[in-house]
Amino acid sequence: MNKLSILSNLKRTKTTGFELSTIEALLNALPRAALIVNAADRSIQAVNIRLSELTAYARSNLIDLPLEKLIIPPVDNDLVHFLETAAQSDVTADHLCELVRYNGTRVHAILNISRLTGKDEFFLITLVSEDTQRRSRLAEYRQQNVWSDLDQLWAIYTQPDLPNAIQQSLNVGAELSGAESLGIYQVDGQSPLMRQIASLDSKEYLPPEIPPQDLGPLGEAALWVNGKRPLTSLHRQARADNLAYVASAPIGQANTAIGLFIAAGISSPPIHILESIEFLANLVYFIIQSHTLVSQLRTDLAGAQLSLAANDMIFDSIEDGLIFLASDLTITRLNYAAELALGYSTAEVTGQSIKNVLISNENLETTFRFAQEELRTGSQANLRIYRRSGDSFLSNLRILPFSANDGLKSILIVLHDLSEQEEYKNRNQQLEQRATLADITASFAHEVRNPINNISTGLQLLAEKLPKEDPNQENISRLQNDCDRLNDLVKSGLSFVRPVEYKIEPVDLGQLITHLMDRWRNRLSRTKVKYNAVVDANVPCVDGDFRALEQVFTNLVDNAIQSMEEAGGTLTINIRHTVAGEDRSHVEVSILDSGPGIPPEAKDHIFEPFYTTKRSGTGLGLAIVKRIVTAHKGSIHVSSIPGGTMFQVRLPCK
């Protein structure tokens, strides 16, 4: 039968006469391999280019070829029945079959039959290999899920662990690219090789490292497919493993790449495989760079936090007060010394004007204006600053402005508290005065002692010569008591100003005080004072001078009795052994009276020399007591309320 006469019957309309070239052009427009078959003798009448590529037949060899030599229907179906069944169906459907290629090999295919004429004389058959169909569906699936994959890629940036993030990028990369094997290589700092740092390669097609000679050809994005000349050892290995393709792209800039992204597959490469690999390589580069940057930022942040902590420690440990001001003279921060000096915490004064906090006896407004407007450093010496409580202290003030290109940034006030220096100065003056007084006292005592003794001796002789009933005996007795009092005053003054050498030996304080109170028994019997002693058992001895310690407790007991002689009361003495830590063992003696107590204004001065609340007192008794206790490495404390006073003497054990 003539071909043209057959093809002229394909379209039975008013428009007829399609030529073979026109039919083939229409077939070439189809996305699948296609052919037109004569239903009568099942011979092939026309084909498109895709069928020729799929079967490896030349197009001229396919024309008039019996269809049974090209298509094998499913089992239990001969070709005639297969075509008749398809011809009777008005619904287009896919059918499984086998396609016989030119070399005799068979591939699984999916076939679709459509009628072209009303009398079923010709059929249009389209074919696609099962592998191509599978890859097409995978590509369609990837296309449908591309946004989901991109969302996963975006989430990878939030992964704190770099190896985990890179591995996740490979998992998503397999979905996007369709490659069976993926690998990431990075430059090894110890050698010129690129070593594999992550892979998704169950068959182990990709090598563990890329040699230096391959880095040049792989410096740009490249796609090698089986059948082309291999350019690198990577390509030669891929050909030996019968891989269909290898796609690679540098990670980073072409000339300064830090690694390679490689994909390989055993089937034909997807259409956009190279673009996908370049995209994934850039993604990995950004992941590595971002994690490197984050790691560096974390290191810098840790260093900054450490520096900030050190600065805060230094800031608060400086003995001078530091006050930071904003450019508008509002307070931003105080260190601990400034808080202690002024009586304010940083939280209380932050945002407050310095004029409301730094109150002085001089006007500081001009100094602050010079610092604010002219960036001039200012200082004020011997300035009296008032605390929050209303007290004042002497200080030196420095005002330091900090500026940048656009003007004043902040002002630092350095507040040097001179209170301690002022106290030292006053104390030195007192010590100098006391030293001078000691010299005068010693000289005075030496000059006065002999005349007092002469007067006392003369009074004794005069009393012996006069009769006992002589009225002058009373005057002589009064004068004699005054001489004794003057003599005691001179003796106390000398003992206070004269250096004393103590004879150190073990002293039993319980026994010392017991003997002392035995001597006071007669005096106590003439008063309304009751005596009560509590001595713990096994109280150890102390190292001390017996006579000096006896003087200490004589003074304290005498003061207690004098405070209760008029109204009466109870004198209680407690002696006990105290231990505070391994090396702090003491004997504590508490002397408690029920007298009127010590006035609060006198309590802080009772141990000062020449300070006394008694009309006939010298003011040296308690000063001498404290001096002796201190010389014995002990301590003395007083506590008093209306209705009682207690002195506590603590001396270290032997």
Image (cartoon, rainbow, N blue to C red):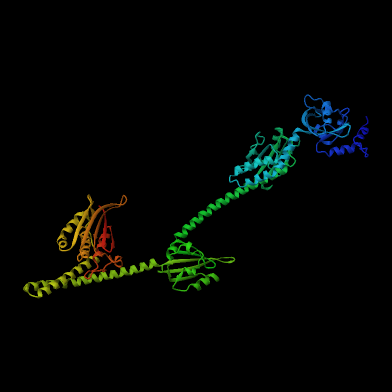
Q: Nearer the viewer, residue 199 or 196?
A: 199
Q: How many marks?
A: 0
Looking at the picture, how far across and down is residue 119, in whole percent?
Answer: 89, 32
Q: Nearer the viewer, residue 312 or 346?
A: 346
* Residue occupying the point 57% across, 49% down: 295
From the viewer's perspective, tell me whether residue 240 is left or right of residue 294: right
Is residue 356 depicted above or below 654 in this figure? below
Q: Mark yes or no: residue 458 visible.
A: no
Looking at the picture, how far across and down is residue 215, in whole percent?
Answer: 68, 42
* Residue occupying the point 58% across, 44% down: 161
Residue farthest along the top direction in this orientation: 76
Is residue 55 depicted above or below 643 in this figure? above
**Which quarter of the figure has residue 211?**
top right
Q: Mark yes or no: residue 46 visible.
A: yes
From the viewer's perspective, tell me whether residue 140 is left or right of residue 427: right
Q: Nearer the viewer, residue 250 or 68?
A: 68
Is residue 638 depicted above or below 385 in this figure? above
Looking at the picture, how far across and down is residue 52, in whole percent?
Answer: 83, 34
Q: Quadrant of the N terminus?
A: top right
Looking at the picture, how far across and down is residue 483, in whole percent?
Answer: 16, 71
